[in-house]
Image (cartoon, grey):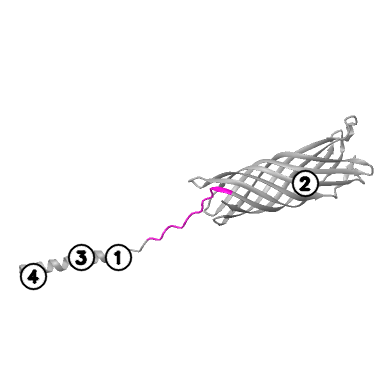
């Protein structure tokens, strides 16, 4: 009887061990978690876009003498910056850009005392640039962002009425604000689409300090949509 009991206990022990081994072996191996993209790093890229502007001409001493240049056209340039991503997925950074443009106008009408005059007006936004701070939120490889800062532009404009008129060239400074969406197409390739509004302020021209009516003001603000591709280091 003792022999039977010992044999039975031995068989139960062996069966229990086999079951335990089988349970360990049958557990699935956990798969590694997918890598999450990190936006921290420097980048440099190129961009193209289209801009339309509001540009108003006036003569302070003669309010009825006005014109709207309102140039529009395409542009292209470069940009560079640095981003830092925090553990809560907030991304902050700084960026600088400059663009050469074909944003022009040559069909504006000059109004004197409420009547159209036969003057020729022309405007040319030669180049523009900005130094901006950026704030975004990372959804892995997608990042919506907002940006704003200092804006600068070189603006040429003129009024010509036979042998009379003026030509002016000014470097205008102002502010810019906008937002966009950036996508990491690869670990080192960033694609973006952005809208931007810039107000470059105004410029005053006085052709002759002894003749008050030669004083005139021109202001400039722009809206633009741009696409960019950058290399992330």
Considering the numbered disc 3 on the image, is that residue within a helix, a strand or a loop? helix
Q: State the CA–CA distance, disc 1 to disc 3.
A: 14 Å
Task: Count neighbours of disc 1 (C-alpha within 10 A) and say few if under 14, some if 14 to 19, many if 20 or more.
Answer: few
Q: Nearer the viewer, residue 130 or 5?
A: 130
Residue at the extreme front of the image, as rendered: 233
The span picked out in magenta is 30-42
Q: Nearer the viewer, residue 67 or 203?
A: 203
Considering the numbered disc 2 on the image, is that residue within a helix, a strand or a loop? strand
User: Which-is-in-front pick, marks 3 and 2?
Assistant: 2
Mark closest to the chain's N terminus, 2 or 4:
4
User: Which-is-in-front pick, marks 4 and 1?
Assistant: 1
How far across and down, in percent of the image, does residue 183 sit? 58, 55
Asked if marks 4 and 1 touch (Cβ < 8 Å), the reply is no
Residue at the extreme right of the image, as rendered: 163
Residue at the extreme left of the image, as rendered: 1
> Residue 207's image quarter?
top right
**Residue at mark 1:** 25
Mark closest to the chain's N terminus, 3 or 2:
3
Q: Which of the numbered marks, if any, corresponds to residue 16?
A: 3
Mark closest to the chain's N terminus, 4 or 3:
4
**Residue at mark 4:** 4
Q: State the CA–CA distance, disc 4 to disc 1.
A: 32 Å
Q: Which of the numbered marks, if any, corresponds to residue 100?
A: none
Report the label total.
Answer: 4
Q: Is residue 181 left or right of residue 3?
A: right
* Quadrant holding the N terminus: bottom left
Is residue 41 on the magenta stretch?
A: yes
Is residue 202 on the magenta stretch?
A: no
Q: State the CA–CA distance, disc 3 to disc 2.
A: 85 Å
**Residue at mark 2:** 125
Q: State the CA–CA distance, disc 4 to disc 3.
A: 18 Å
Q: Main secondary structure of the magenta part?
A: loop
């Amino acid at each position: 009887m003792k022999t039977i009991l010992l044999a039975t206990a031995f068989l139960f022990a062996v069966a229990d061990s086999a079951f335990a081994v089988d349970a360990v072996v049958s557990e699935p191996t956990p798969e590694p978690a997918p890598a999450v993209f990190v936006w921290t790093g420097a980048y440099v890229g190129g961009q193209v876009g289209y801009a339309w502007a509001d540009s108003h001409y006036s003569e302070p001493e003669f309010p009825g003498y006005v014109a709207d240049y309102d140039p529009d056209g395409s542009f292209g340039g470069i940009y560079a910056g640095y981003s830092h991503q925090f553990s809560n997925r907030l991304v902050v950074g700084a960026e600088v850009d400059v663009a050469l443009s074909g944003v022009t106008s040559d069909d504006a009408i000059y109004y004197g005392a409420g009547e159209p005059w036969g003057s020729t007006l022309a405007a040319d936004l030669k180049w523009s640039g900005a130094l901006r701070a950026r704030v975004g939120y990372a959804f892995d490889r997608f990042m919506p962002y907002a940006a704003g800062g200092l804006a600068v532009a070189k603006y040429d404009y003129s009024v010509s009425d036979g042998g009379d008129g003026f030509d002016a060239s000014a470097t205008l400074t102002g502010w810019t604000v906008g937002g966009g969406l950036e996508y990491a197409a690869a670990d080192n390739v960033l694609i973006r689409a952005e809208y931007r509004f810039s107000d470059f302020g105004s410029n005053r021209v006085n052709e002759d300090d002894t003749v008050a009516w030669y004083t005139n003001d021109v202001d400039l603000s722009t809206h633009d949509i741009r696409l960019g591709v950058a290399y992330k280091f």
